[in-house]
Image (cartoon, helix red, strand yellow):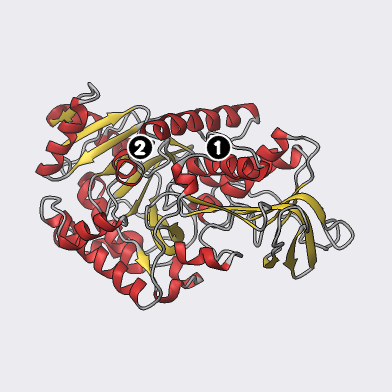
Amino acid sequence: MAERQVPEALAARNLAGARQSVYWWDTAEAPEALPAFGAPGAQAGPGANTADLAVVGGGYTGLWTALMAKERDPDRDVLLLEGARCGWAASGRNGGFLEPSLTHGDSNGEQHAPSENARLRQLGAANAREIAATIERYGIDADYRASGELILASEPHQVDELRAEASGTGQEVLTGAALRARVDSPLYLAGLFDPDASAIVHPTRLAWGLRRAALEAGVRIVEHTPVRGLDQPRAHGLRPVRLRTDGGDVVAQQAVLATNVFPSLIRRLRRYTVPVYDHAIVTEPLTPEQEAAIGWAGREGLADMNSRFHYIRPIDTPEGLRILVGGYDAHYHFGRTLRREYEHSPATARRLAQHFAAIFPQLADVRFTHSWGGAIDTCSRFFSFFDLTCGGRVASAAGFTGLGVGATRFAANVMLDLLSGERTELTELEIVRKKPIPFPPEPLAWLGIRTTTAAMIRSDRNRGRRGPWLRAMDAVGMGFDS
């Protein structure tokens, strides 16, 4: 509907000056890059190539793991190896929604882990509180704000779903003037505000703050050091792990693989994830009059209820309020391929600009300054899975499906528990012991994802009714309902 109502020419004009670069990297001062393995001044090289724990990957998953490993044991020698710059991939490209859910929504948790979903809600809430405490304890300038989230209905059947959800919590469904007072958009029919649903952060500042905290705790970090291979010990306690880099080998007693969307060094794990590209655009700073026209005094995150949903968040800057809008399209490219050119989709950016003008017609003339995309590690249950291999020496986690800002810290705790060899509450969770259904080989993966996307479109246009294909996916354990 928005694409019919808003001319493509208007969207193209509003995007004409947008940089094809990540807003978060352009608006925060990046720390100086750390030397690569073996380079002058590097914290690891051929003469210092051993570690108690080697962490592969410098996104949120790897940074949380390295930092918490030192918190658990300050004497543990921890080495983190990052292929490019810490936080450059998904951890520095997302919308900055820090949600407590570990299962990509409560209903998705009920579908995939009904026996422990209530406990997972508690663990997720505790994890979110611990993230806030860590940010405060280390003085991380992540623009953290516990804003909550406003869930929005744009279709009549979604209003009924909101009312059903609110009836069990005592929360009030906002409609009419009450909703317009919260956020003034003609597109939305109702809204439900959940103060505990999400916090908002500056993604790269969070990553760089964790990097600084890890360095100060004694973690050694080398950047621009891709790990090319892993020699796997076949029996527990007999041989250390050997990681191959361009500068030489790293020998570690244990390792954590935190490469997420990138192909796992454990080949059998590659079939559990596919890379899906998500995109976002950011407006120029609004004038005071434009800010007043949309209200939004609470500055909470916004998300709609469609299967192909949007996420919208405020970005307060000294020059004025900017708005980020992302989501809707999710692009999978044949063969699980990852390429730099996939990070830019003019067609998706244009659609998002059209949708933005329909959501906020008061801002139809606002221009956009940034447009970018990034790959998400999607698995068939839509939240993280875990693995322990190489005689108990190598742990890994992946499959966060866009909810990694908060869930990566939980995953780091799980992996450290797994490596400890002890039975803990986390290691005994079903979601830790059980993996999702793997994706089939090509061309079946591509055909299945295309078919599922088309079915989701039909569902959104048919009052949310799930057709035969989506019901079949639910039945085999590959359905998604956030």
State the residue at coordinates (44%, 70%).
342
Q: Is residue 252 left or right of residue 134?
A: right
Camera-near label (2 vs 1) is: 2
Q: Which image quarter holds the C terminus?
A: top left
Q: CA distance from mark 2 to mark 1?
A: 35 Å
What is the x, y in percent for residue 385? 48, 51
Question: Which residue is at the front of the view, 199 or 267?
Answer: 267
* Crowd rating for badge 1 (residues with CA inside 10 Å; few <14, some 14–19, many 20+): many
Q: Is residue 327 left or right of residue 335?
A: left
Q: Quadrant of residue 439?
A: bottom left
What is the x, y in percent for residue 371? 42, 59
What is the x, y in percent for residue 207? 59, 45
> Label for residue 190?
none
View extreme (front): residue: 235
What is the x, y in percent for residue 272? 45, 62
View extreme (top): residue: 170
Q: Which image quarter holds the N terminus?
A: bottom left
Instruction: Return the residue at label 2.
Output: 115
State the residue at coordinates (36%, 43%).
113
CB contact under 8 Å: marks 2 and 1: no
State the residue at coordinates (86%, 63%).
46
Question: Which residue is at the front of the view, 464 or 413?
Answer: 413
Q: Quadrant of residue 194?
A: top left
Instruction: Return the residue at label 1.
Output: 142
* Crowd rating for badge 2 (residues with CA inside 10 Å; few <14, some 14–19, many 20+): few
Tag 2's secondary structure? loop
Which residue type does callout 2 highlight?
Ser
Relative to 7, residue 196 above or below: above
Q: Quadrant of residue 288?
A: top left
Relative to 157, residue 460 above or below: below
Q: Is residue 319 visible?
A: yes
Question: Which residue is at the front of the view, 444 or 432?
Answer: 432
